[in-house]
Amino acid sequence: MTTLATTTETKNTYAKYCPNVYVAKCPEPHEKGEVIPVTTQYGKDNDSIVFNLVGQKDGFYYYSIVRADGYNVQERAKAKAERYSQWAASAEKKSTQYYEASNEGREFLSMGEPIKVGHHSEKRHRALIDRNWERMGKSVAMTEKAEQHESKAGYWERKTKDINLSMPESVEYYEYKVETAKEYHEGVKSGKYPRSHSFTLTYAKKALNEAENNLKTAKKLWA
């Protein structure tokens, strides 16, 4: 965990504890369950619920916290998914509008009337074709943009189910991960599960160690 040197700081601020986890860096001690304001680097205060004291250094107390309003990584992902879905719908709407506009003079153009070079209608004829061509290009571009936004919306929608160490639910989650990793590791050793390559057992042990370390961290933060 990285912290700054001793300062005259009086506000509760955020400090990175481990990947995905920020704790409250506080100049004063607090009780578990207490609601305190924690100030972001941009000066915004977030009311947060104190969980566990995870460290003390240079006169500061470091507490695991969750937002009092329930905002977390899943809510962030949900908001992003909704935002991209809205952008996709907006782009699709614009694409349709451009496509419909590209049909200007459709009945005339469908007759295959050639451009009459030198005739007073030449300029209008060419301008009509150019406008429709440009509108069709914009329609295609908006469709592609809508597809990109839909893809990102799908990505963030999948992230709404993620659980990581920043959430109290991670204790139960990593207990399950340890249980399944341990069962698989023992199964590889016993021959219950096949070794698809020479490092199968090594990778199984690595996954077990990682799950156990995460569970240890989760319990320190939230148990």
Image (cartoon, rainbow, N blue to C red):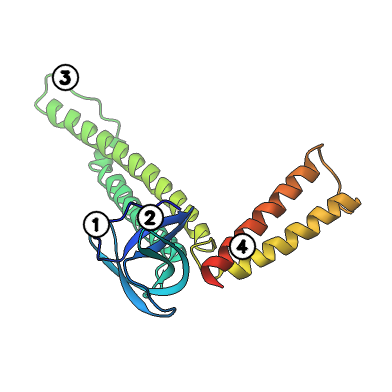
* In this view, the mark in front (2 or 1): 1
Q: Looking at the picture, which amino acid does disc 3 mark? A: Val
Whether label 3 touches label 4, CB < 8 Å: no
Secondary-structure class at tag 3: loop
The image's mark for residue 84 is: 2
Q: Tag 1: Cα neighbours inside 10 Å, few (<14), some, or many (≥20)?
A: few
Q: Amino acid at mark 2?
A: Tyr
Q: Earlier in the sequence, mark 3 or mark 4?
A: 3
**Residue in the foreground of this view, choosing between 42 and 213:** 213
Q: Residue 77 versus residue 176: which sits nearer the camera?
A: 176
Q: Residue 191's spot in the image, x, y percent?
A: 90, 50
Q: Is residue 217 left or right of residue 29?
A: right
Residue 42's mark? 1
The Cα–Cα distance between marks 3 and 4, rounded to whole angstroms, is 81 Å
Foreground tag (3 vs 4): 4
Label 1 amino acid? Tyr
> Please, what secondary structure does the residue beneath circle 4 have?
helix
- Percent coordinates x, y for residue 86 in the rendering: 35, 59
